[in-house]
Image (cartoon, helix red, strand yellow):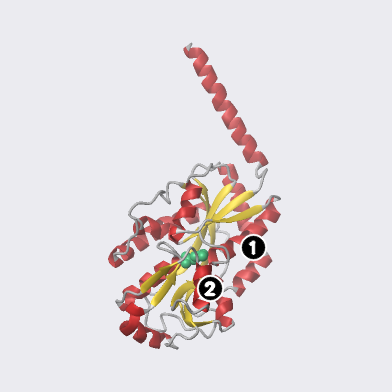
Amino acid sequence: MLKTLAAAALCTILAMSGASAQSATNYPAQPITIVVPFSAGGPTDTVTRLVAQSMSKDLGQQVLVQNVGGAGGTLGAGQVADATADGYTLLLHHIGMSTAPTLYRSLAFDPLKDFTPIGLVTSVPMTLVARKDFEPTTMAELVDYLKTKGTDTTYANAGIGSASHLCGMLLQNALGVKMITVPYQGAAPAMTDIMGGQVDLLCDQTTNTTNQIKGGEVKAYAVTTPERLASLPDLPTTKESNLPALNVSVWHGLYGPAGLDPAIVAKLQASLAKALKDETVKARFAELGTAPATEAEATPDALRQTLTSQIELWRPIIQAAGEYAD
Ligand code: ASP
């Protein structure tokens, strides 16, 4: 009886490893879906669609994008943490993976344990923008304005755990004010309301603000990188504006659920690295004020290290701000 059971178990194990080897060899045999945990048309979506298009060509299978917005990116990330680890459901998420574990009192997933890192994708500068007719015209004027009227100012963000939320938190910390927060499912609808004049301020990635700044559809105050950007050379840095603490770039990474077959990870990593060298992707990234991750960065190890160190970096800053969500 025992022998029969042991033989059956062995057969199952052999069949499973055979199936896994088989699926890794044939991978991808069907379309792949990349979950973007924010709305369509926003910065994470823009980056993902550019990369997905290039990976589709390389992998010979459609790489589709599914937008699962809400709760600052944690809903979409949670969906991928629970997905089957077969390489057909992936996640492209940003810095929010490192802030969510501190911001959320109870989080349905562990960013370090429930995902398989594939590689870093890009790191996008942020810009502080406002509705066109918002009173302050320079960063110095904005600082003065917020110090006196900050509690009446509305600040749009993509929910607690989003990059726009983090940037707003840094601004509020630096000035010692609390604005009225207006959360959206992504930065795209937040930008629509900034352009429509329904909200006052937004800090968001250049991938979502460059065209609107250049087209004069929003008022821009500063960029959150230590140096000015080639794509927006007239925009001062936050450092130039005496706000050095408002220094943040939004790194993005590609993940699968935990337990992804290393052979599948290797295929996805190679395809990601190729996409990041694609001239069309590079040119579009440059227009939007960002640059692709380097070959060394577009690797599982680099993403794991970034995620680990960024969780440590942001924890005390978030704890000092005392801003949490359930
Ligand atoms: N990246 C944006 C944010 O975190 C959200 C989005 O991509 O729509 O604010």
Name the amino acid type tagged 1.
Answer: Lys
Is the CB–ligand 1 distance for label 1 below 8 Å? no
User: Which residue is found at the position 48% from the left and 11% from the top?
Assistant: 1
Query: How many numbered discs, if any?
Result: 2
Which secondary structure lies at badge 2? helix
Q: Position of residue 180 (x, y in %)?
A: 36, 73
Q: Are marks 2 and 1 in contact (CB under 8 Å)?
A: no
Name the amino acid type tagged 2.
Answer: Thr
For residue 158, side relative to residue 122 (left or right) = left
Q: Is residue 187 above or below residue 238?
A: above
Question: Is there any visible trace of residue 247 in the rendered image?
Answer: no
Residue on which disc 1 sits = 277
For residue 52, side relative to residue 198 (left or right) = right
What's the mark number on residue 13?
A: none
User: Which residue is found at the position 45% from the left and 74% from the top?
Assistant: 203
User: Which residue is found at the position 52% from the left and 14% from the top?
Assistant: 4
Q: Position of residue 127 (x, y in %)?
A: 48, 76
- Mark 1 is surrounded, within 10 Å at the Cα level, by few (under 14), some (14 to 19) or many (20 or more) other residues, namely some
Q: Viewer-nearest of labels 2 and 1?
A: 2
Q: Position of residue 148 (x, y in %)?
A: 31, 84
Residue on which disc 2 sits = 192
Q: Position of residue 26 (x, y in %)?
A: 67, 40
Mark toward the start of the polypeptide (2 vs 1) = 2
